[in-house]
Image: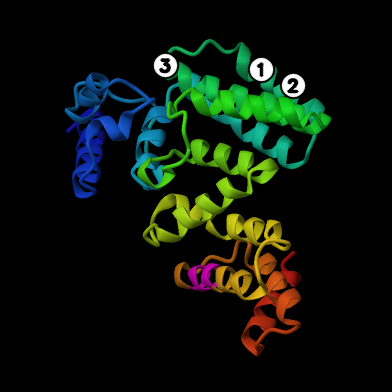
Amino acid sequence: MNDSNVIGAILGMERTNLSLTISKVCDGLCSASTYNRYESGKMLPDKFMLSALLERMGKNPNRIVYTVTDEEHKLLDIKKKLKESILDNDYERTKEYFDEYSDIPKTRCKNIHKQLEFEIEGELCRMKGDTEETLSLYRKALEQTFKKKSLDNINESLYTVREFKLLYKIGEINDFDLLFKLGYFLKKLANNHYLKIVFYGDLIADLVAASKDRWMKQMQLEYLEDALQYKRQIKQSRGLSRLLKMKKDILGKLDREEEILLGMETLMG
């Protein structure tokens, strides 16, 4: 069985198990006819398309061993550098890597690559303090693959990690209602859903932080407790210390086990 057939079988199995239609999975990413060719093994999706499709199904694409082309490898390497420079809030490095990424001709998945480019432009504007243009670029990025104009029924949509991340960023800046909807959306997902694993703790922490003048402390605690319980269930420590500190700020104390966890997280940096 060749790579095309293996990948096609994986896509078909995951989509069928979730009872998802082809049009819902591939909407904005590729045409239904192209997706059919992926699933039937007649065409092999590149790394970027495969990741996006699996993320729409709530799966971790990094669990699949996949050979990439030289072009894909180069783009993935620059993406990694971009992520690091943005985390460091380094405008000059981010601009350098952005120019390098933009200059590489993309032979496939142009909408997915354009989405990243708009997002990075938004990050550059954010670093300069231009909030209005940042939001505009985030929205342009989202529109490359997420065609829905209204966000009233976000529970009915499927998202890639980047699509959800863009919604999250927009909500963080100036849309508490959107942030709340995203938190509720994640809360209802299965514990093994990739979006929940990636975003839940951080989003709940940001939601609670933004709700200080909106929610009673009891409601804030309920959301924090749910996120903490989820972290324990999936044995994930990332973001745990922030949640524990927020709980301690509200209650004034933690139980003995939580104090030990917080101390360990603090020691580990």
Q: Are marks 3 and 2 in contact (CB under 8 Å)?
A: no
Q: Earlier in the sequence, mark 1 or mark 3?
A: 1
Residue type at the position of mark 3: Arg
**Can residue 263 be seen in this snapshot?**
no
Q: Are marks 1 and 3 in contact (CB under 8 Å)?
A: no
On the image, the x and y values in percent for residue 269 come to 75, 64
Q: Earlier in the sequence, mark 3 or mark 2?
A: 2
Q: Secondary structure at mark 1?
A: helix
Residue 217: name its quadrant.
Answer: bottom right
Counting other residues with Cα less than 10 Å from the Cα at mark 1, is it few (<14), some (14-19), or many (20 or more)? few
User: Which label sits on residue 108?
Assistant: 3
Could you tell me what secondary structure mostly forms the magenta stretch? helix
Magenta segment: does it hold 228? Answer: yes
Counting other residues with Cα less than 10 Å from the Cα at mark 2, is it few (<14), some (14-19), or many (20 or more)? few
Residue drawn at x 46%, y 41% is 152
* Residue interval drawn in magenta: 226-232
On the image, the x and y values in percent for residue 63 come to 39, 47
